[in-house]
Image (tube, rainbow, N blue to C red):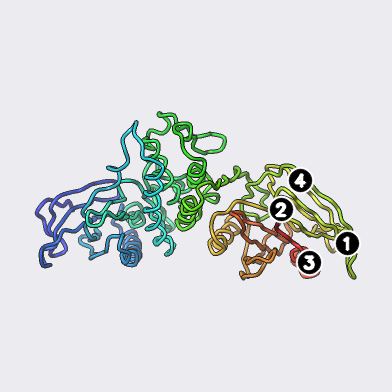
Amino acid sequence: MNLIQGQTIGGHYQILTQLGQGEFGTTFLAQDMQTVGNPQCIIKHFKPLSTDAYTFSEAKRLFDEEVIILQTLGKHEQIPQLLAHFQENQEFYLVQEFIPGHDISQEIPPLGKRLSEAETIKLLKEILEVLAFVHQYNVIHLDLKPTNIRRRQLDNKIVLIDFGAVKQITTQMINSQGQTSFTVAIGSYGYIPSEQANRTPQLSSDIYAVGIIGIQALTGINPADFNSQGLQTNYNTGEIDWRNQIQVSQQLGEILDIMVLYDFRQRYPTATSALQALEMLEKTPDTVIQKPLQFAPRQKFFMSVGITAVVATISLWLLQLQTHTQNFLTYQDSNYGIKIKYPTNWKIQENSNSINQELVIFFSTEISNSNNYQELLTVSIEKFYGNLKESQDLFSNEIKATLSNATIIDTSETTLAKKQANQLIFLSKDRKKNLKNLQIWTLKNNQAYIITYSAGIEDYDRFLPTAEKMIESFEID
């Protein structure tokens, strides 16, 4: 149904004017004729791509799910309240609070002008403070851009509008097997990262969009014009080369670089983490924020969640230790400030290979007909800008996505190097060998220190005491 000015829908919402129209639907300004004062409101009109019974049923399910989310998010004072929702003629309508004010595209200067660093930091923090509430519910906005971020006239506060998830109802298709897929990626050109373009968005996809807004504010260049205005994408790394356009402090530049990294696993995982980095910048303006080294693919067998450090100069000295049951040597890497003890009858491989990316691997030398797999313990270090809870979700998802037939059988809290840590036990397969794996990690100074013990299922318990001694000996300077 095409709505026109003066038309009434939902029994009492009178259309005043059309505000916008896109491939996902149409937005109108309306007024509620049954409420005292006839307050203005926003009506969003969505049409499913197909009207067959199955597609409509799935569209309604998606719509109902998103209504619940929008009702929850609307409890925040800087997110519009959902006033009503209904369907007419197999089409869907949302009625939301109208926010008088302007969107921040009016605050970000045109080409050739720029916001100051202080103004940019203030804007980013305002956005992230509201987005942190959204991410607490594990909701991705999906369409953060200046026109979807309003400055409220009443109190000059930022308000996030036009969440993208509900737009799925207009883009879904049902194949012959009854499976649902979506015809396009939701988001806006220039603000959408690669994983979202591939229809697998993450919470950090929103962080990418906010980072792009920050770069736009500093450079005065619209992201649609980045390439034509000299902000080239490095085809080897996928990163945006933007700092040649302006003079920006090392600290803020590094934070924005992290926000817009090509690999979503290396960005700040949530709005809270990015906000904390900006707040630390203001508290300690002389502190250099280290940018993660470029992520490289790993061997699929080892689960270390994308190690970003290529080993430089590693020093290894041997100190013979005698215990009642087993002799141990000590491995030390002075660059990363770690120590760990390992049995004298285990082999050691220091990894300076940018493809494999593990820092050091210890191998059992016991090979027999009954034990045809080398038990191993891997030490890995990667950049991580979130907290332990965020890392738990990310590492678990990475295991499931990266390892063939991986099954997580236990998650728990523990300690590593006298610090609070997380622990996962999971099953995986290496060729025809069924493996059992123990992974423990802790966080310090924006780095994750990860130890992974792997063995054949039948030999896991036999070698576990040795692995536990190694893990207990681990130290971080």
Going from N to C along the chain, the mark reached first, 1 or 2, is 1
Q: Is residue 40 left or right of residue 165?
A: left
Q: Where does residue 157 sit, x and y in percent of width and height?
A: 29, 55
Across the whole image, how many numbered discs are drawn on residues?
Answer: 4
Foreground mark, 3 or 2?
Answer: 2
SS for callout 2: loop
Name the one closer to the observer, 217 or 119. 119
SS for callout 3: helix
Residue 43 visible in this rendered orientation of the protein: no
Which residue corresponds to mark 1? 321
How much space separates mark 4 and mark 1, taking CA atoms? 21 Å
Going from N to C along the chain, the mark reached first, 2 or 4, is 4
SS for callout 1: strand
Residue 314's label in the rendered image is 4
Which residue corresponds to mark 2? 337
Residue at x 89%, y 67% (from the top left corner): 323
Residue 427 visible in this rendered orientation of the protein: yes
How much space separates mark 1 and mark 3, taking CA atoms? 13 Å
Q: Quadrant of residue 475?
A: bottom right
How much space separates mark 1 and mark 2, taking CA atoms? 20 Å
Residue at x 65%, y 56% (from the top left corner): 303
Q: Amino acid at mark 4?
A: Ile
Going from N to C along the chain, the mark reached first, 4 or 1, is 4
Q: Quadrant of residue 66?
A: bottom left
Figure quadrant of the C terminus: bottom right
Going from N to C along the chain, the mark reached first, 1 or 3, is 1
Q: Amino acid at mark 2?
A: Gly
Which residue corresponds to mark 3? 469
Foreground mark, 4 or 3?
Answer: 4
Q: Where does residue 224 sit, x and y in percent of width and height?
A: 37, 36
How much space separates mark 4 and mark 3, taking CA atoms? 23 Å
Packing grade of label 4 (10 A; few <14, some 14-19, many >=20) is some
